[in-house]
Image: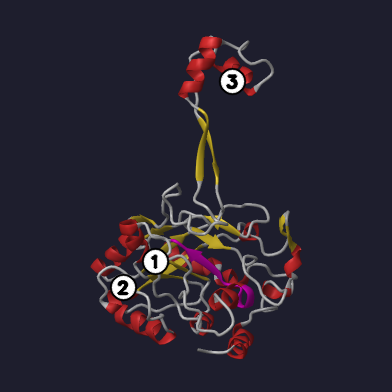
Amino acid sequence: MASLNDFRRLGDDVRNWGRWGDDDELGTLNFITVEKVAQAAGLVRHGKVFSLGVDFGSSGPQGAFQYRPNPIHVMTVDGGDAETLVKYGPDWFKNTVAQQLSGYFVDNPFRFNDDMVIMPLQAATQWDALSHVYYDDKLYNGFPANSVTSLGAFHCGIDKVDPKGITTRGVLLDLVRHRGAQTFLEHGKPITPEELDEVARAQDVTVERGDVVLIHTGWWARFLENRDGTEPYSGLDWRCASWLHDHEIAAVAADNLMVEDPVSGIEGTILPLHMLCLRDMGLMLGEYWDLTALSADCAADGVYEFQLIAPPLRFTGAVGSPVNPIAIK
């Protein structure tokens, strides 16, 4: 078990504050250049499309965390409304929504359905914004943590990503296949930097500047079997921050709930990799990505690189965003 002093030393080593200017709020997404986008487009050879997003619904991976429930889907207008309102007419409720709706339905064939969703922005497949995690009262690039208020994140919100976008070369590192696991990486053996290098060599793929690295642990496939959103697993060890920093990747995502291993490895704190990535490096994390079909295809043709398109939704001031990432080979 390492100490908080060890953690802080690594934080100093990987910190990117000021690297792209004192006002930068993009962090390692700056590694995605126009040349990198063009390179990624050139990886499309067969037109095979893989959706890496999961379903947003009541049976999703949240629920165990009381502060972050599964999405609630509500119909605001449906066929039953139309039938009832046409039958009883606009006088049923005076000066109400029902009266307004009935005006659409009476004396013409037009009908429609409407709905809305109430959900945490990190309910399923998502990106963590750089404002999501902090320590010592500082966000990425030294912005004050209190600049995130009840009105949202003034600095490093997910909306700052949109002008840049996230379209680049994706690289899958299949830890399930490398370890010979039948389904997923069971709890108790964190993924080390050395193992990431071993997987890349075994797959004959090179991780380059500006890539988004996808870590296949098999956790999502396991979740679909037992619907246990709290089942422990093996994720990235906190020391992988050095590996991510040295390879100058744009972002990292995994098919589990936290990317990093649930066992901290640092005495006196939880989720050290979140702090090192989001706060120190300015490197976004993607969680709950479905890598099952993509990993099977990569194993079949031996090609572990692809075009990745994964822009977040532009929620002003939000500290995270749902996403439906697409990999194209």
Contact (CB < 8 A) between labels 1 and 2? Answer: no
Tell me which amino acid carries mark 3: Leu
Residue 230 lies in the magenta stretch:
no
Q: What is the number of callouts on the image? A: 3
Residue 58 drawn at (x, y percent): 44, 47
Q: Report the Cα–Cα distance between label 3 and label 1.
A: 46 Å
Q: Report the Cα–Cα distance between label 2 and label 3.
A: 53 Å
How is the structure coloured here? secondary structure
Contact (CB < 8 A) between labels 3 and 1? Answer: no
Element assignment for label 1? loop
Q: Which dot, 3 or 1, sits closer to the camera?
A: 1
Pick whichever of labels 2 and 3 is earlier in the sequence: 3
Quadrant, the C terminus: bottom left
| Magenta stretch, residue numbers | 279-288
Residue appearing at x 38%, y 84% in the figure? 195
Res. 148 image quadrant: bottom right
Is residue 311 in view? yes
Q: Which residue was labeled with disc 1?
A: 231
| Label 2, residues with CA under 10 Å away: few <14, some 14-19, many ≥20 | some
Q: Is residue 318 left or right of residue 124?
A: right
Tell me which amino acid carries mark 2: Val
Residue 70 drawn at (x, y percent): 49, 51
Pick whichever of labels 1 and 2 is earlier in the sequence: 2
Give residue 101's mark: 3
Residue 287 lies in the magenta stretch:
yes
Give residue 176's mark: 2
Tell me which amino acid carries mark 1: Glu
Element assignment for label 2? helix
